[in-house]
Amino acid sequence: MRVLATRKVLFDLRTLRNPLELITSSLMELSSTTQSEIRLTLDALMVLTNGIRQSGIDLRSTLDDRGFSRAPDASAAAISRLTSRLEGLRPLVETLSEMEDVAAMARVNEELNELDVRPSIVEHGGVGPHIHWTPATATFDDQVMTDMLMALAQELCDNGTIRFGRCGADDCDDLFYDGTRNRARRFCDDPKCASRTHTADHRARQSRAREAPGKK
């Protein structure tokens, strides 16, 4: 489970009316650490979705590499359930870049309503006070799905869907989350996509320059 740390956390679950209210009512002030965790979690969601779509990803090692500490010891059954659940979430993730903010929020609310989201403030392992979104008894797949959806919900509250995109290479349609300050990202994680596109653009400019009137 990824750790989402905050400097100030206030809860009033008695006034909670929908899952997105949980975000705004419980996170009074996000630290830069938390914002980084959200970016990392959303990036992991994009990588997992791309991998599942292409049927070529080791879910356990991918989650372990991206800081989900329970991944190495998760049961095969939990990994199998998580694969199925991420596959079920894929239509939403794949269309985020095309969705209006309100529609995306509604869909995330639907997903969150299916989860046992029970936030608590914990402190362990040398990490300061932070939020766990699920109880200690939650299964690994429940924890991962909740972490992913809570990060997605926070992103929608902060920025809407504008930071979600598809690779700009002609022969790739992988998804990505754009964590750059000026939202300048155009390509997926594969550096070959950017390289091929830049090379093709450069050659096209050279061709146009040679064909321009007055050029010999």
Image (cartoon, rainbow, N blue to C red):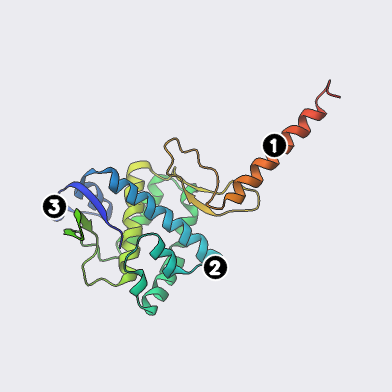
- Lower sequence index among marks 3 and 2: 3
Instruction: Give yes or no for contact between labels 2 and 1 (Cβ–Cβ under 8 Å).
Output: no
Residue extending furthest front? 126
Disc 1: which residue: 202
> CA gap, disc 2 to disc 1?
32 Å
Residue drawn 46% across the image and 67% down it: 87
Image quarter where the C terminus lies is top right
> Label 1: few (<14), some or many (≥20) within 10 Å?
few
Q: Secondary structure at mark 1?
A: helix
Query: Label 2 is placed on what type of residue?
Result: Gly
Which quarter of the image is occupied by the N terminus?
Answer: bottom left
Give the residue at the far right of this rendering. 216
The tally of labels here is: 3
Q: CA distance from mark 3 to mark 1?
A: 56 Å
Residue at 46% over, 38% down: 183
Q: Residue 182's spot in the image, x, y percent?
A: 44, 35
Disc 3 marks which residue? Answer: 12
Amino acid type for the residue under numbered disc 1 = His
| Secondary structure state at the residue bearing disc 3 | loop
> In the rendered image, which residue does mark 2 sit on?
56
Q: Residue at x 40, y 45 (%)?
A: 101
The correct choice, above or below, for 1 with respect to 156 in the image is below
Identify the mark nearer the N-term, 2 or 1. 2
Residue 59, position as x, y percentages in the image: 44, 68
Q: Earlier in the sequence, mark 3 or mark 1?
A: 3
